[in-house]
Image (cartoon, rainbow, N blue to C red):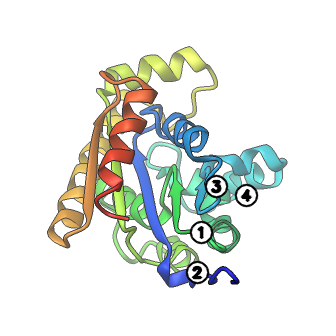
């Protein structure tokens, strides 16, 4: 008997969101390690675009210089690469999958940036990015909470600090994510909340998988 092909609309999308160095990619990798033998799960590391050459880094810098100064640049501009490629990568990652995990989710990121930086709709790049990423909410959201000071410690430890990574910016984004979570809860979307400063990646993964059993 042939396996019935999953329609794209049947795929459950799980978005892992949070400020820089809150542990999104670490959690994604831990989930992938646990579920890699089950081909019905997919994993999309949105930050991975940077590994595929210099083009997307150039694209991010280009958009940065085009419309914003460095004091107020939302991260989705400097991360233009993953935002632009997300719709195409999703088509590949979601093929024949039941659940797909993302370590960022562009529509939610844009909403958070808009809130954090008080961007108005007339900003000319916002409609462009919304067109590329769509506006569909995920089915489940994992919010990675972390103290901004702790996040900065991790950022400084890893090296390569970027201009948008400061305690003030992280605090703004943390607050913006909280507002986005309120909106999602009001719509009845499942939210799994993780305190990444108190839990190991293994504990986080166990909690996420336990909660997901009730959803998918």
Q: Position of residue 128 (x, y in %)?
A: 55, 77
Tell whether 184 sits left or right of 35. Answer: left
Crowding near the residue tagged with mark 4, few <14, some 14–19, many ≥20 C-alpha atoms within 10 Å: some
The residue tagged 4 is 59
Provide the secondary structure element on which disc 4 rests.
helix
The residue tagged 1 is 97
Q: Nearer the viewer, residue 38 or 50?
A: 38
Direction right: furthest residue: 53
Task: Determine the CA span between mark 4 and mark 2.
Answer: 34 Å
The residue tagged 2 is 6
Which residue is at 69% across, 83% downward?
1
Q: Position of residue 171 (x, y in %)?
A: 29, 36
Provide the secondary structure element on which disc 3 rests.
helix
**Can residue 176 be seen at all in this image of the molecule?**
no
Residue 150 figure quarter: top left
Task: Determine the CA span between mark 3 and mark 1.
Answer: 38 Å
Q: Are marks 4 and 1 in contact (CB under 8 Å)?
A: no
Provide the secondary structure element on which disc 1 rests.
loop
The residue tagged 3 is 65
């Amino acid at each position: 008997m042939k396996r019935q092909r999953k329609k794209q609309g049947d795929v459950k999308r799980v978005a892992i969101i949070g400020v820089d160095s809150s542990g999104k990619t670490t959690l994604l990798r831990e989930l992938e390690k646990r579920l890699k033998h089950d081909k019905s799960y997919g994993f999309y590391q949105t930050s991975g675009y940077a590994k595929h050459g210099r083009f997307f880094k150039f694209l991010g810098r280009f958009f940065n210089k085009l419309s914003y100064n460095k004091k107020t640049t939302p991260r989705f501009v400097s991360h233009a690469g993953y935002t632009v490629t997300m719709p195409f990568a999703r088509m590949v990652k979601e093929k024949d999958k039941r659940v797909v995990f993302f370590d960022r989710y562009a529509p939610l990121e844009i909403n958070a940036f808009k809130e954090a930086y008080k961007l108005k709709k007339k900003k000319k790049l916002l409609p462009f990015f919304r067109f590329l990423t769509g506006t569909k909410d995920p089915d489940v959201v994992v919010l990675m909470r972390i103290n901004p000071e702790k996040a900065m410690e991790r950022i400084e430890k890893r090296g390569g600090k970027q201009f948008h990574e400061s305690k003030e910016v992280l605090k703004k984004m943390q607050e913006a994510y909280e507002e986005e979570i309120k909106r999602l809860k009001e719509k009845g979307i499942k939210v799994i909340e993780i305190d990444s400063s108190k839990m190991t990646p293994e504990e986080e993964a166990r909690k996420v998988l336990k909660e997901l059993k009730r959803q998918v």
